[in-house]
Amino acid sequence: MDNVCKQRLAIEAVKIRQGIIESTYHAKSGHPGGSLSIAELLSYLYFQEMNVDPADPKKTDRDRFVLSKGHAAPALYAALANRGFFPVEDLKTLRKTDSYLQGHPNMNYVPGVDMSTGSLGQGVSAAVGFALASKRQNDLFRVYTVLGDGELEEGEVWEAAMFAAAKKLDTLTVFVDNNNLQIDGTVEEVNSPYPIPEKFAAFGFRVIVIDGHDFDQLEVAIEQAKQTKGCPTAVIMETIKGKGISYMENQVNWHGAAPKEEQYRIAMDELDAQLKALQA
């Protein structure tokens, strides 16, 4: 990937992070930590890779994206808003009673959301269903889904994985956001899903391990997934929870806590500085 493209995607990732902080601050609730850790992935998918059209969000041949870790909705909303699916200003209405941007994505109200998610494990199952539909329509579209590493503790994830491999759903790419933290602590402390790559390989997936904040590695992994035939692909992304905000990085307490006023100001100042550096 050339430097101009990487710079463009890095700018979009910062804007996604700004949207995450803006929305959770105004909501006074939400899940910033695990939203911030997938900003690069969403930047790459929505601004480089996926066949989507904000003017026609339901077009038949669009690529599908399912946020299986539905609590990271602030990241998805920020990506969709910056891509033009709805006004960026609406991010400030997150979780408000009369807002269409609720705490988990709702396909009935939010343009660009392909599946309502929230109950962990169910999103990846829906993504597998999309991939089966694509296969039966001669690979009409590709399907991408993101799971949390703590979400891998759900048995339904592995039922979906077994089915995807058995049906040779090679239009499916599963991303695991391996930031090693969930609501109650590290994933090892709670209920270790490790070793993650070996588990997906045992279920019949092609497995790729990358730095989830590196655009070059994201590009290579997605291209390899597109070239893979006869089995689905799992991309294990090693990430940092709270990425981009100094006091949030690798801090488990930011899994489900919103920044207060001073914290909001510090976070936005840091992101503004990152944006200016990229645009210089």
Image (cartoon, helix red, strand yellow):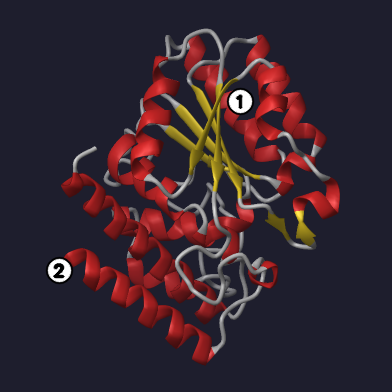
- Local packing at callout 2 (Cα closer than 10 Å; few below 14, some 14-19, many 20+) is few
Judging from the image, what secondary structure is the residue with disc 2 in?
A: loop
Residue 280 disc label: 2
- Local packing at callout 1 (Cα closer than 10 Å; few below 14, some 14-19, many 20+) is many
Indicate the position of residue 244 as horizontal and vertical percent values. Answer: 45, 66
Whether tag 1 and tag 2 are in contact, CB under 8 A, the answer is no
Indicate left or right for 132 with 218 as reference. Answer: right
Identify the residue under disc 1. Answer: 128
**Residue placed at 21% from the left, 45% from the top?**
5
Q: Nearer the viewer, mark 1 or mark 2?
A: 2
Distance from Cα at disc 1 to Cα at disc 2: 42 Å
Vertical order, 183 against 124 (above or below): below
Amino acid at dot 2: Ala
**Residue placed at 51% from the left, 62% from the top?**
74
Q: Nearer the viewer, residue 202 or 99?
A: 202
Locate the C terminus by quadrant.
bottom left
Indicate the position of residue 102 as horizontal and vertical percent values. Answer: 57, 63
Q: Is residue 261 visible?
A: yes
Amino acid at dot 1: Val
Indicate the position of residue 155 as horizontal and vertical percent values. Answer: 81, 34
Residue 98 image-quadrant placement: bottom right
Indicate left or right for 252 with 97 as reference. Answer: right
Q: Is residue 120 visible?
A: no
Indicate left or right for 203 with 112 as reference. Answer: right
Locate the N terminus by quadrant.
top left
**Residue placed at 27% from the left, 59% from the top?**
11
Vertical order, 141 against 218 (above or below): above
Indicate left or right for 124 with 214 as reference. Answer: right
**Residue placed at 74% from the left, 62% from the top?**
183
Vertical order, 233 against 72 (above or below): above
Indicate the position of residue 225 as horizontal and vertical percent values. Answer: 45, 22
